[in-house]
Amino acid sequence: MATILRDWSYRYQWLYDSISRLAALSVGGEARFRQLALQGLTIHSETQVLDLCCGSGQTTQLLVKFSQNVTGLDASPKSLQRARQNVPLASYVEAFAEKMPFADNLFDVVHTSVALHEMQPQQLRKIISEVYRVLKPGGVFTLVDFHAPTNPIFWPGVSVFLLLFETETAWELLKTDLAGLLAETGFEVGEPTLYSGGSLQVIQAKK
């Protein structure tokens, strides 16, 4: 069970931003963190991009620099209001990730950043299926999220962070084989790329 700090971090933008910057120091800062899942991808002005669970638009802001066709989806009206203010060049849709109001085979790239750990196991499976549905053949689902540290030095910091700001679903993700779930759905996926002593994973899966 997370503390009241979790609620405050979603209620107050300045606190959320401060936490994000602090957490990103382990990979060289927030700017580098936002680019981790996008490395190696070809995104041009016509690429159809979905920023899934876009929050306040932190990564959306980077995506609109490459493509004129970026859509942000989030279930939180408050987050979308902030995203529209922060990144007006994108379009936005309020909806749940497990039931997206998009046609089949619509997007070239679906991106999500530290959002899947918020989902219950059944939700997670539905979301992965939905991502597969809305991606074009050959499209890529790219994500960054928590991973069980492979370097024991990182366990205390990760544990404190999860206790303060996350819920049991984040702990559940540490035990989940995300790459395996993606492969079960039909994605072509290799081994995750790990950062920060293995506490962060980046996966790029192709439909």
Image: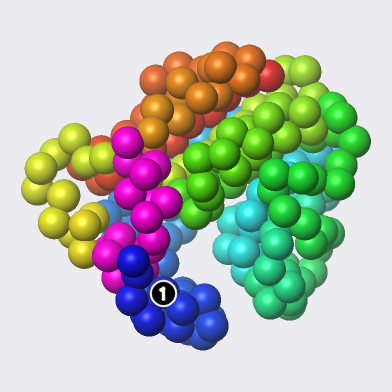
Amino acid type assigned to the residue bearing label 1 in the image: Arg
Q: Which residues are magenta?
A: 161-175
Vertically, is 95 above or below 165? above
Q: Residue at the location (54% across, 83% down)?
A: 11
**SS assignment for the magenta stretch, majority:** helix
Q: Nearer the viewer, residue 112 or 177?
A: 177
What is the crowding at mark 1: few (fewer than 14 residues within 10 Å), some, or many (at least 20)? Answer: some
The N terminus lies in quadrant: bottom left
- Residue lying farthest to the right in this orientation: 103
Q: Is 103 left or right of 121, judged from the image as shown?
A: right
Task: Give coordinates of residue 67: x percent, y percent.
Answer: 76, 46
Q: Is 124 left or right of 154, judged from the image as shown?
A: right
Task: Give coordinates of residue 190: x percent, y percent.
Answer: 45, 17
Task: Give coordinates of residue 146: x percent, y percent.
Answer: 37, 46
Q: Residue at the location (51% across, 25% down)?
A: 181
Q: Helix, strand or loop at disc 1?
A: helix
Q: Nearer the viewer, residue 11 or 125?
A: 125
Q: Residue at the location (21% across, 64% down)?
A: 160
The image quarter in which residue 3 lies: bottom left
Q: Residue at the location (77% across, 57% down)?
A: 95
Q: How is the image coloured?
A: rainbow
Vertically, is 184 above or below 64? above
Q: Evaluate whether residue 42 shows in this view.
A: no
169 is within the stretch colored magenta:
yes
112 is within the stretch colored magenta:
no
The C terminus lies in quadrant: top right
Q: Which residue is mark 1?
A: 6
Q: Evaluate whether residue 57 shows in this view.
A: yes
Q: Is 20 left or right of 194, judged from the image as shown?
A: right
Task: Give coordinates of residue 121: x percent, y percent.
Answer: 50, 40
